[in-house]
């Protein structure tokens, strides 16, 4: 997709009510795209939509942006919620060009100390959720013979870390899922990229042993996503380590 073609394309962004997801949603709204933000908390989603409208740029005044932003309350780990989010997106905008699998939770704990419940909680959102969302949008993308799925992984998806077994496993898995989607989707011009950032300055990493001023900013990840979407269709980027 070249830059002008981003206008009026449709993106579904999970975990879009704060942090990286909200920054990505803002960048895509500013690019003229129609954006669906998905999150579990209705109040936070409402606030996020307000921020998106207030921050609309590039000829996207608030009135125009209102018609191009949709908020859907959903838990990506639940198949029914995911189906409903995709159905609402298609009912409103008739297509889905981009999926950003950003929804994620952290999870601390050494392998010997992790309960099955804690393990499942992290994997169900970070990996199962991405799988469910990708599975739900692929039929629409295949009909269009075009699509892009961006999976927000982590440096923890490249390097195992002590005390973060569940989180690392989920993010390693997301990289593998992303590569499989790319291989399977190639005949329909469906691309997939895993973005693997180090510490990003969001509430999720409060208490991390890194000064926030030295962290990656959410807007940096958003700019990376927009850059990928503006590449020619022939540019296949499997992974970006930030």
Image: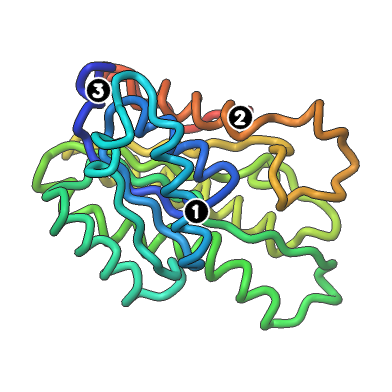
Q: Position of residue 36 (x, y in %)?
A: 32, 50
Left or right: 177 with respect to 110? left
Residue farthest to the right, as pictured = 209
Mark 3 residue element: loop
- Would residue 11 be seen by someone viewing this image from the given angle? no
Q: Nearer the viewer, residue 52 or 90?
A: 52
Q: Nearer the viewer, residue 107 or 61?
A: 61
- Judging by the rendered image, the residue that carries numbered circle 2 is 241
- Number of numbered discs present? 3
Left or right: 111 with respect to 50? right
Q: Is residue 142 above or below residue 237?
A: below
- Judging by the rendered image, the residue that carries numbered circle 3 is 1
Q: Position of residue 109 (x, y in %)?
A: 82, 67
Q: Residue at x 50, y 25 (%)?
A: 224
Q: Residue at x 58, y 26 (%)?
A: 220
Q: Residue at x 22, y 17 (%)?
A: 4
**First-in-chain label (2 vs 1):** 1
Label 2 Cα crowd, 10 Å radius (few <14 / some 14-19 / many 20+): few
Q: CA distance from mark 2 to mark 1?
A: 30 Å
**First-in-chain label (2 vs 3):** 3
Mark 2 residue element: strand
Q: Position of residue 193 (x, y in %)?
A: 43, 36
Q: Is residue 6 above or below residue 173?
A: above
Q: CA distance from mark 3 to mark 1?
A: 30 Å
- Judging by the rendered image, the residue that carries numbered circle 1 is 47
Label 3 Cα crowd, 10 Å radius (few <14 / some 14-19 / many 20+): some
Left or right: 70 with respect to 152? left
Q: In which quadrant will I find the C terminus? A: top right
């Amino acid at each position: 997709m070249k830059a002008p073609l981003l206008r009026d394309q449709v993106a579904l962004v999970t975990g879009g009510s704060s942090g990286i997801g909200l920054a990505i949603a803002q960048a895509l709204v500013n690019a003229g795209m129609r954006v669906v933000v998905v999150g579990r908390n209705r109040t936070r989603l409402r606030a996020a939509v307000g921020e998106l409208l207030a921050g609309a740029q590039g000829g996207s005044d608030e009135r125009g942006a209102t018609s191009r932003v949709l908020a859907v309350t959903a838990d990506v780990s639940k198949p029914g919620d995911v189906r409903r989010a995709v159905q609402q997106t298609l009912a409103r905008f008739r297509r889905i060009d981009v999926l950003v699998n950003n929804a994620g939770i952290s999870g601390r704990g050494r392998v010997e100390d992790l309960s099955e419940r804690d393990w499942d909680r992290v994997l169900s959102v970070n990996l199962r959720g991405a799988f469910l969302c990708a599975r739900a949008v692929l039929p629409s993308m295949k009909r269009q013979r075009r699509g892009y799925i961006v999976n927000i992984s982590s440096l923890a998806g490249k390097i195992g870390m002590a005390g973060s077994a569940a989180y690392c496993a989920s993010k390693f898995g997301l990289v593998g899922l992303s590569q499989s989607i790319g291989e399977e989707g190639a005949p329909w011009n469906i691309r997939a990229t895993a973005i693997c950032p180090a510490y990003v300055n969001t509430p999720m990493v409060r208490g991390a042993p890194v000064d926030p001023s030295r962290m990656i900013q959410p807007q940096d990840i958003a700019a990376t996503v927009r850059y990928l979407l503006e590449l020619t269709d022939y540019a296949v980027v499997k992974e970006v380590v930030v």
